[in-house]
Image (tube, rainbow, N blue to C red):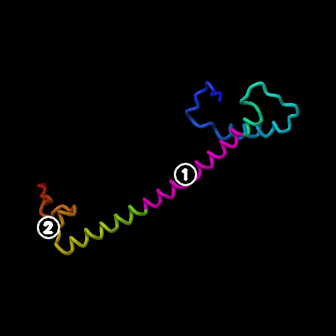
Amino acid sequence: MNVSTIDFSRRIPAKTIEADIDSFHGTGFIKNYIPVRSEATPEALKAAYEDMRAKQQNETELLAAIKAASAAARLAEVEFHDRVMAMKETVRGQFGSNSDEAQAVGYKRKSEYKRPRRRSA
């Protein structure tokens, strides 16, 4: 396989890939095509095209799976948060805002807040 000297650390633009596919399909209309380079043979081009399409399909399937997993995780996070908030409200309702139990679940004791001071005019 001949690797281009151009740095392709970024994806090739879709417009360029589509033009390459059109060129590949266009070789089917060329009579007496005899390539000098082994990577330019119709068989090598077809194998590379099929490999690219298979990997693109795999990428698309994996991206869909990632989106589904992300949505499921987000939903689970929201559900967990809602349940924790319900638990905190229950603890505060059962034991009071100034209790050790309320402090244990993350609330600040009411007595720890600074009292508002009057400002002198």
Secondary structure at numbered mark 2: loop
Residue beneath the point at 69% across and 43% down: 50
Q: CA distance from mark 1 to mark 2?
A: 50 Å
Residue 48: say if magenta.
yes
Left or right, 12 with respect to 24, comes to left
Residue beneath the point at 59% across and 50% down: 60
Residue beneath the point at 76% across and 38% down: 24
Earlier in the chain: of badge 1 and badge 2, it is: 1
Q: Which residues are magenta?
A: 47-74
42 vs 61: above or below = above
Left or right, 8 with respect to 27, comes to left
Of badges 1 and 2, nearer the viewer stands 1
Residue 32, percent from left and from top: 87, 31
- Density class for disc 1 (Cα within 10 Å; few <14, some 14-19, many ≥20) is few
Out of 59 and 15, give the one closest to the viewer: 59
Residue 31: say if magenta.
no
Q: Which residue is mark 1?
A: 62
51 vs 64: above or below = above
Image quadrant occupied by the C terminus: bottom left
Instruction: Give the amino acid at mark 2.
Output: Asn
- Density class for disc 2 (Cα within 10 Å; few <14, some 14-19, many ≥20) is some
User: Picture quarter containing residue 78?
Assistant: bottom left
Secondary structure at numbered mark 1: helix
User: Picture quarter containing residue 21?
Assistant: top right
Left or right, 52 with respect to 112, comes to right
Residue 93, percent from left and from top: 21, 74
Marks 1 and 2 close (CB-CB < 8 Å): no
Q: Which residue is mark 2?
A: 98
Residue 25, percent from left and from top: 79, 40
Main secondary structure type of the part rendered in magenta: helix
Image quadrant occupied by the N terminus: top right
115 vs 45: above or below = below
